[in-house]
């Protein structure tokens, strides 16, 4: 008897009636032992289910069909004269779980039985987006079992190819509930490829062209010969399975096999272009107008990358864990940075892709990946991402037996620079790349006669060899710009960390280093030998000179610290400023001209807190962004039910056993709330310090340098995020 015969008029007699009674008994046995609806899928509690599960396949096939039909029609309890408020509602709740439980194990379906059951699933949906509520993926798995045992017939092949065009499958992305239609697509394609002689007939996945990444992938695959298309088809089918937080060993092994089938060199070249397209994606914002009860309102929607495209991109990134070259790691560093840039009211643009990039960088050989993580830690603002990066940095430092600060120092690439400059030969021409300042580089051509030239020589444009080398130099220039900015920011953190170096280590990583030295050689350092401290600048000749021009003697035992102006008198600070002006030096970060915040009389009176930055109105999202950049932690205040009335912007100071807190209060202004329910504005309150015991510390006991740097950050938050900086604020109501 076929499945269709089960539902003819009068079929619920004899054997079929007994089956329905058995299914109802399963529901009752589970319901009698569980009181909550979310517990009603524990079929181990049902002796009747165990009998059915271990019984003949024919009965299980009929049970799946009966459950589907009766659930779809929702009339089983009516025919059985059962109160719908009791067992009938239980049956309705768990029937699909029961179908899933039966389909999990292999069942010997016929081909007709499989297609009839799939059609039955499709029959009982009112809208295409309800289709995933059926265990479609498990039924497709049964199809896979059938094909492995019996081969792929022409009729089943045609049915599966048609399935791929169904709106229920073609239009669905990863489902938050029920079957994942992306996985269903992949499994169908695997069945088609697994059929004898059928793999070439399976087309490459077509990505959505709503974003430039999808367009780039489609353009690439459509331009390939059939053999390469087949290889890319397998790769894309594999990438779409990248659904977990980290790749499994099995996933990575298969990925390596698929890349090898295409050719590692060819693959890397193609992926480089695709990652560049992904890194260049822009947010598309659309404004919509709607009305409700006579009131018109507007709202924005934001689009960055289509969901399936993002998942494929994530898998593509994972596949690069087998490569450790500078070009690949540089592309991943850029992609990670773009991925974590925020979209208003949404969050990071591609958090999953960003995390995948971080994973690959952390698992690369050598220290270059670590250097990218160190740079990203200073760029991202999300606290959970910072924690993830720090976790990987800690693992890298533990592996090498060095501190967290040291691993960041020793991992920084020098790009082959000497004194911030390097020259690359192009036949009898040369190209000089110079790091002229933080985030700034220049490229200057030199002709054989020694004269400079601005434009690219004609022979370079006409040669693939020289064009490739020029592209590498330009890529280095971009990376140098990013790294120099990150190192400037990292060194600035040394003020509050109170870091000290032994002289040989300091020279290697802060003065002689090709890239970091461009920052370090412009700063004032405190050199301590035999208990005597002197402030000095490093001169190009290799000597240390104080502000009066005297040579400062150093040994390997000399201890080095970054000088902070709060450690000197105002006269000495002024003298250093004048000395820098005479040298015509512009420091890469504020040091001699750094703002200093001293304890005030009012703060001596309040003792444990400061009101210096209180009673300001700030733009909350701008405050949040600034806090992340400066390594502070903050949670946005919202108007939802569990929203807090106040919060703190805080930063841990482990060197001193303290935590600094800047208190923030919510401000209720009608209409001043984002679509996500977050207040647009907040008010500032006190600044305080607490120790490890959560006790407030008197400000007079806080080191002067720490107090100054904390107040400097808070002043930055207030100065930049204040509504007073918005000329349109008075008109905002």
Image (tube, rainbow, N blue to C red):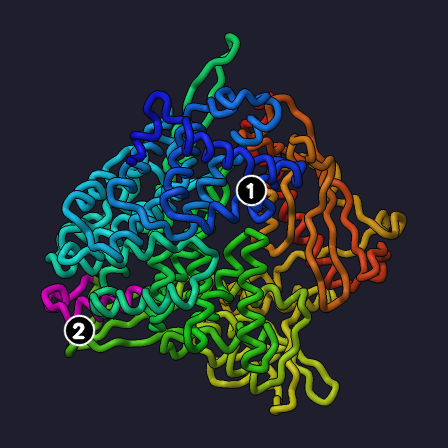
* Magenta highlight on residue 273: no
Q: Residue at x 32, y 65 (%)?
A: 255
Q: Residue at x 52, y 23 (%)?
A: 80
Locate residue 61, reporting x and y percent: 37, 41
718 in relation to 501, above or below:
above
Most common secondary structure along the magenta stretch: helix
Where does the C terminus fall, quadrant-wise? top right
Q: Residue at x 61, y 41 (%)?
A: 39
Residue, disc 2: 447
Q: Nearer the viewer, mark 1 or mark 2?
A: 1
Q: Residue at x 9, y 65 (%)?
A: 462
> From the viewer's perspective, is 340 left or right of 417?
right
Residue, disc 1: 41
Magenta segment boundaries in residue numbering: 455-475
Based on the displayed image, in which of its 4 quarters is residue 577 positioned?
bottom right
Where does the N terminus fall, quadrant-wise? top left
């Amino acid at each position: 008897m076929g499945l269709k015969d089960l539902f003819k008029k009068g079929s619920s007699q004899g054997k079929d009636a007994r089956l329905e009674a058995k299914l109802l008994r399963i529901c009752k046995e589970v319901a009698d032992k569980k009181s909550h609806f979310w517990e009603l899928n524990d079929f181990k509690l049902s002796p009747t289910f165990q009998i059915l599960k271990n019984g003949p396949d024919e009965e299980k096939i009929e049970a799946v069909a009966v459950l589907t039909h009766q659930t779809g029609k929702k009339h089983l309890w009516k025919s059985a004269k059962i109160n719908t408020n009791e067992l009938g509602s239980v049956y309705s709740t768990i029937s699909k779980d029961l179908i899933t439980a039966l389909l999990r194990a292999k069942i010997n379906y016929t081909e007709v039985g499989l297609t009839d059951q799939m059609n039955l699933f499709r029959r009982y949906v009112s809208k295409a987006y309800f289709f995933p509520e059926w265990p479609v993926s498990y039924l497709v798995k049964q199809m896979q079992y059938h094909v492995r045992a019996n081969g792929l017939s022409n009729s089943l092949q045609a049915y599966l190819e048609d399935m791929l065009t169904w709106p229920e499958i073609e239009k669905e992305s990863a489902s938050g509930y029920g079957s994942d239609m992306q996985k269903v697509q992949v499994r169908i394609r695997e069945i088609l490829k697994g059929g004898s002689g059928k793999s070439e007939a399976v087309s490459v996945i077509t990505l959505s062209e709503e974003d430039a990444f999808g367009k780039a992938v489609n353009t690439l695959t459509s331009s390939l010969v059939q053999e390469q298309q087949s290889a890319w088809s397998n790769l894309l089918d594999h990438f779409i399975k990248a659904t977990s937080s980290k790749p499994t060993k099995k996933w990575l092994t298969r990925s390596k096999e698929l890349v090898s089938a295409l050719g590692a060199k060819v693959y890397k070249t193609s992926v480089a272009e695709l990652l560049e397209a992904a890194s260049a994606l822009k947010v598309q914002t659309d404004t919509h107008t709607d009305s409700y009860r006579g009131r018109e309102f507007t709202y924005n929607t934001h689009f960055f990358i289509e969901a399936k495209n993002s998942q494929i991109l994530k898998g593509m990134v994972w596949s690069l864990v087998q490569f450790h070259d500078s070009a690949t790691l540089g592309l991943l560093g850029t992609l990670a940075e773009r991925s974590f840039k925020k979209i208003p009211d949404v969050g990071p643009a591609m958090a999953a892709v960003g995390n995948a990039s971080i994973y690959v960088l952390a698992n690369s050989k050598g220290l270059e990946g670590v250097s990218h993580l160190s740079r990203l830690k200073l760029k991202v603002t999300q606290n959970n991402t910072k924690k993830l990066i720090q976790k990987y940095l800690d693992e890298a430092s533990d592996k090498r037996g060095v501190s967290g600060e040291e691993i960041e120092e020793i991992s920084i690439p020098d790009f082959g620079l000497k004194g911030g400059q390097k020259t690359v030969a192009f036949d009898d021409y040369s190209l000089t790349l110079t790091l002229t300042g933080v985030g700034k580089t220049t490229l200057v051509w030199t002709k054989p006669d020694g004269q400079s030239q601005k434009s690219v020589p004609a022979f370079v444009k006409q040669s693939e060899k020289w064009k490739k080398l020029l592209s590498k130099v330009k890529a280095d220039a971009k990376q140098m710009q990013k790294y120099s900015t990150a190192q400037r920011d990292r060194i600035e953190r040394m003020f509050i960390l109170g870091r000290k170096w032994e002289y040989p280590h300091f020279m290697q990583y802060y003065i002689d280093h090709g890239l970091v030295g461009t920052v370090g050689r412009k700063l004032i350092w405190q050199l301590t030998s035999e208990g005597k401290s002197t402030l000095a600048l490093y001169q190009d000749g290799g000597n240390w000179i104080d502000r009066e021009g005297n040579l400062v003697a150093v040994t390997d035992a000399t201890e080095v610290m970054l000088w902070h102006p709060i450690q000197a008198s105002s006269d000495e600070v002024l003298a250093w400023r004048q000395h820098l002006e005479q040298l015509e030096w512009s420091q890469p970060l504020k040091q001699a001209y750094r703002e200093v915040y001293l304890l005030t009389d009012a703060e001596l009176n309040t003792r444990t807190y400061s009101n210096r930055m209180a009673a300001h109105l700030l733009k909350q999202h701008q405050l949040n962004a600034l806090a992340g950049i400066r390594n502070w932690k903050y949670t946005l205040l919202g108007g939802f039910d569990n929203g807090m009335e106040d919060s703190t912007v805080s930063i841990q100071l482990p060197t001193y056993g303290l935590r600094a807190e800047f208190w923030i209060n919510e401000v209720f202004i009608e209409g001043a709330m984002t679509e996500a329910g977050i207040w647009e504005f907040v008010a500032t309150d006190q600044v305080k310090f607490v120790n490890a015991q959560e006790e407030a510390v008197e400000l007079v006991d806080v080191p002067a340098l720490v107090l100054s740097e904390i107040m400097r950050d808070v002043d930055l938050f207030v100065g930049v995020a204040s509504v007073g900086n918005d000329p349109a604020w008075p008109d905002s109501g």
